[in-house]
Image (tube, helix red, strand yellow):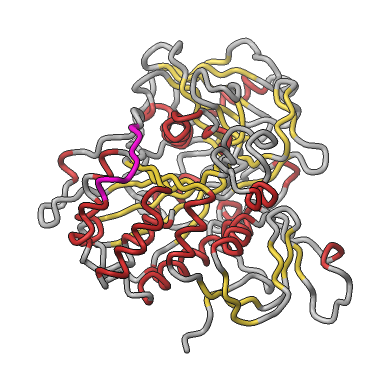
């Protein structure tokens, strides 16, 4: 996350540190997508690419007693989860960058043989040891249709060291805030200096409490931020802008400053070998981008589970987020207009009902037939949960056909690869929160905010709730960059 952001914020002196780059740890990810040869920008020699930015909250490797007391021991918190899931899109022809965030509680199918089971939150896809980044890449590509070309992974120590290597950052807090879980405790308002430890507490805060004006209650009695993880994503976007601006202002164009910075963070990151080979070219080509102008969007979602949690096939998944189609695909297409494949009509669509709703498969198949799809109602499937997503299941090489079916659906709809499905056939498992619509994906989509689709179509959501916005909705207590002095 930090390294990729600094790539577009620092100067063009990285040739000085080329020898340092050779010591960056690399782990290959077989499910990375190779960029299309025809997409290369001839002037820069670079292709448009999507770089997955992973914040790994693993405690593995923590030995410092202070850190163990703060974050928990490796024995208490085993495994790995993605605390941050962002995708940086770089376009060399336009010399632009943009970021798409994926909520960590998004519920989706896991890759085959995943140790966390067949269905889980997307953050759990990382929990596969050294293969964790590749497992997460496969989940994003298979279930959201987004190709990932490279990745950067950063753990707790790496995050703290990166901020400390910049001598900390300054963030403006309009109200005191507190989070007992991340150990964030900001007692004053205005511009506050954060070292690496306090900055990590800020970006990890998803149980944030704020002090309303005039309130005299102790911190633990303050009201909670109602948006939890979505608000955390918005705060992380702010943090990235502050971090990149700080890196620029600290003089990373100075070879000595840059050398000291790289020395502090170089051992804390993991990237794929392909990204390592082009770090110099990326830093040089994108050096003029202003980090404050980089668009940052988030996939719209609805929340399921609440105080009781979400149970799927008998397993307690906890609180989860459901996708919101067609808004999600519109947001993806606005972020990267080449990410989703061009739809190709399938030869057959087999429709199965995975709810208790009578004749749902038959009614859905009839509506799809009216839209021109070769849909056939089949026998009912297993009912996995009272509230369920719809899964567009597709065979290998069938993503374009799956997208064609998804173009006709609205609601909680997710892609799901299945190697047992015959070529040309799409299996549609119809869940509890979906409706059939005419194709709605625009040729020149715009970012959809909450309720955008409701103006022209009916998009069902769990409990009729309003989907989240794709743009950051900052609250009065959320921090912002400090005013320029």
158 sits left or right of 384 in the view: left
Question: Looking at this view, is 75 or 219 the one in front?
Answer: 75
Q: Is residue 225 magenta?
A: no
Q: Residue 289: x, y in percent?
A: 30, 68
Question: Looking at this view, is 465 or 77 the one in front?
Answer: 77
What is the tally of numbered marks visible in this picture?
Answer: 0
Q: Is residue 23 magenta?
A: yes
Q: Residue at x 57, y 32 (%)?
A: 108
Q: Is residue 153 positioned above or below 385 on the image?
A: below
452 sits left or right of 6 in the view: right
The image quadrant that residue 221 belongs to is: bottom right
Question: Looking at this view, is 477 or 1 the one in front?
Answer: 1
Residue lying furthest left in this view?
A: 42
Residue lying furthest bottom in this view?
A: 485
Question: Looking at this view, is 350 or 196 the one in front?
Answer: 196
Q: Residue at x 81, y 64 (%)?
A: 223
Magenta residue span: 21-28
Q: Residue at x 41, y 47 (%)?
A: 269
Q: Is residue 369 visible?
A: no
315 sits left or right of 93 in the view: right
């Amino acid at each position: 996350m930090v390294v990729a952001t600094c790539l577009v914020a620092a100067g063009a002196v990285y040739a000085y540190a080329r020898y340092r780059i050779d010591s960056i740890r690399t782990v290959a990810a077989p499910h990375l997508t190779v960029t299309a040869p025809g997409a290369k920008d001839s002037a820069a020699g670079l292709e448009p690419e999507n770089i997955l930015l992973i914040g790994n909250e693993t405690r593995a490797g923590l030995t410092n007693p202070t850190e163990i007391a703060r974050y928990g021991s490796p024995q208490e918190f085993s495994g790995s989860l993605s605390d941050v899931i962002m995708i940086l899109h770089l376009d060399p022809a336009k010399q632009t960058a943009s970021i798409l965030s994926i909520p960590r509680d998004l519920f989706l199918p896991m890759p085959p043989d995943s140790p966390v089971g067949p269905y889980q939150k997307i953050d759990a896809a990382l929990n596969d040891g050294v293969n964790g980044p590749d497992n997460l890449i496969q989940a994003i590509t298979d279930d959201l249709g987004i190709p990932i070309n490279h990745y950067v992974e950063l753990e707790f120590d790496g995050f703290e060291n990166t901020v400390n290597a910049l001598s900390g950052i300054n963030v403006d807090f309009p109200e005191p805030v507190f989070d007992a879980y991340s150990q964030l405790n900001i007692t004053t308002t205005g511009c506050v200096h954060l070292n690496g430890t306090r900055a990590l507490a800020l970006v990890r805060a998803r149980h944030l409490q704020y002090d309303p004006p005039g309130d005299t209650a102790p911190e633990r009695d303050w009201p909670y931020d109602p948006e939890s993880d979505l608000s955390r994503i918005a705060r992380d976007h702010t943090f990235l802008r502050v971090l990149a601006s700080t890196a620029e202002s600290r003089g990373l164009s100075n070879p000595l400053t840059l050398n000291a910075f790289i020395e502090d963070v170089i051992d804390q990151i993991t990237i794929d070998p392909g990204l390592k080979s082009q770090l110099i070219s990326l830093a040089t080509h994108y050096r003029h981008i202003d980090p404050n102008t980089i668009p940052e969007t988030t996939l719209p979602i609805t929340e399921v589970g609440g105080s009781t949690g979400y149970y799927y096939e008998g397993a307690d998944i906890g609180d989860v987020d459901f996708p919101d189609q067609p808004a999600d695909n519109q947001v993806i297409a606005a972020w990267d207009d080449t990410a989703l494949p061009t739809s190709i009509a399938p030869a057959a669509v087999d429709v199965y009902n995975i709810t208790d709703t009578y004749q749902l498969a038959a009614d859905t198949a009839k509506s799809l037939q009216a839209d021109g799809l070769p849909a056939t109602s089949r026998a009912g499937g297993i009912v996995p949960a009272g509230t369920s997503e719809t899964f567009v299941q597709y065979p290998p090489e069938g993503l374009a056909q799956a997208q064609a079916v998804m173009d006709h659906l609205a609601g909680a709809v997710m892609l799901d690869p299945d190697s047992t499905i015959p070529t040309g056939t799409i299996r549609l498992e119809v869940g509890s929160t979906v409706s059939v619509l005419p194709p709605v994906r625009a040729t020149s989509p715009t970012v959809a905010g909450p309720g955008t689709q409701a103006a022209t179509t009916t998009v069902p959501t769990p409990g009729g709730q309003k989907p989240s916005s794709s743009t950051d909705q900052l609250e009065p207590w959320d921090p912002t960059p400090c005013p320029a002095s």
